[in-house]
Amino acid sequence: MSRQKAVLVGILLILTVGCTAPGLARAPPQAACGICTDALDQAAADQGVTLTRGQSKLVIQVYENTSTRWTATVQLSDGASALRNDSLRRAVVSNVFDRARMVAEPTHVTSHLSGQTLTVSYRDPGAAETHDDTIVFTRFHATEPQSPFVMGGEGTPYPGADTVVLRAPNGYTVTGDYASATGSDAAVRWHGNRTTEHIDRSTRVTFIDDQSPQSDSNDATLMAELNDVWSSMYRTLIAALCMVFIAGILFVYLYRLTQD
């Protein structure tokens, strides 16, 4: 096979894989509660501490201004005493956030140990958005890979904890049904075995203001979906421009080969 043909075959293989394997383009799964996963064990081990985790729970409180407070609690049957050292505990928690793949973007992190229970609390200001009198929690919604390179797919969320609870803001009510979750007017709950139970990739949890009965959760969801569409179109345009640019470079390269 000539050099030119080999290059062309390589290009075709790359484009074929890129355009037909969207599942491969997704990032690895992301935990709702990174502190509740084995990332905590590994981070502690880096500090010379051996931990044994028991039951864990993550509570996410959404507020009317769309800010969120995430509180993770992990029962420790072994190694808890070492985490009474404030500086060591902070180093372990920081290490967890550095290594774990999480849906949240933590800020204002605090932690404390009470008995055998480790509690880590943090805020995530970008986890929800508002549409009129409706608030939509979007952190569990994962985008799909984008054409033409089938790139940029976010990892599928999973609980990480034994229980994940998402609470509505005061004065708001949960609306809609959410796959793999149980719900009430005040909260949505996911129960799993930490790693194998995934949260549906299309999950957007909607809260309606109790004082505005005319609000339509479908309208809020539609607005959130439209935002995703615009974002998807933008990423697709950028990817297409990159493809054109690379194709141009390859064309010039192949042209020069034919002149040799």
Image: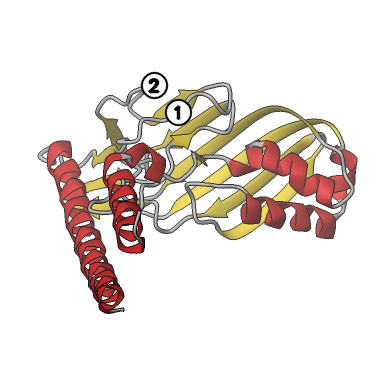
Disc 2 marks which amino acid? Ser
Is 80 situated left or right of 104 in this image? right
Dot 1 falls on a residue whose secondary structure is loop
Residue 198 — which label? 1
**Residue ID at (23%, 39%):** 208
Residue 145, x across and y down, in percent:
31, 47
Q: Residue furthest left?
A: 214
Looking at the image, which is closer to me, 62 or 157? 157
Looking at the image, which is closer to me, 172 or 57? 57
Q: Are marks 2 and 1 in contact (CB under 8 Å)?
A: yes
Is 21 situated left or right of 73 in this image? left
Disc 1 marks which amino acid? His
**Residue ID at (89%, 45%):** 82
**Where does label 2 land, which residue?**
180
| Crowd class of label 1 (few under 14; some 14 to 19; many from 20; radius 10 Å) | many
> Residue 88 lies in what quarter of the image?
bottom right
Question: Looking at the image, how many numbered discs can be counted on the residues?
Answer: 2
**Residue ID at (72%, 42%):** 40
Q: What's the distance in space between the residues labelled 2 and 1, CA to CA?
A: 8 Å
Residue 104, x across and y down, in percent:
49, 50
Residue 117, x across and y down, in percent:
75, 36
| Crowd class of label 2 (few under 14; some 14 to 19; many from 20; radius 10 Å) | few
Dot in front, 2 or 1: 1
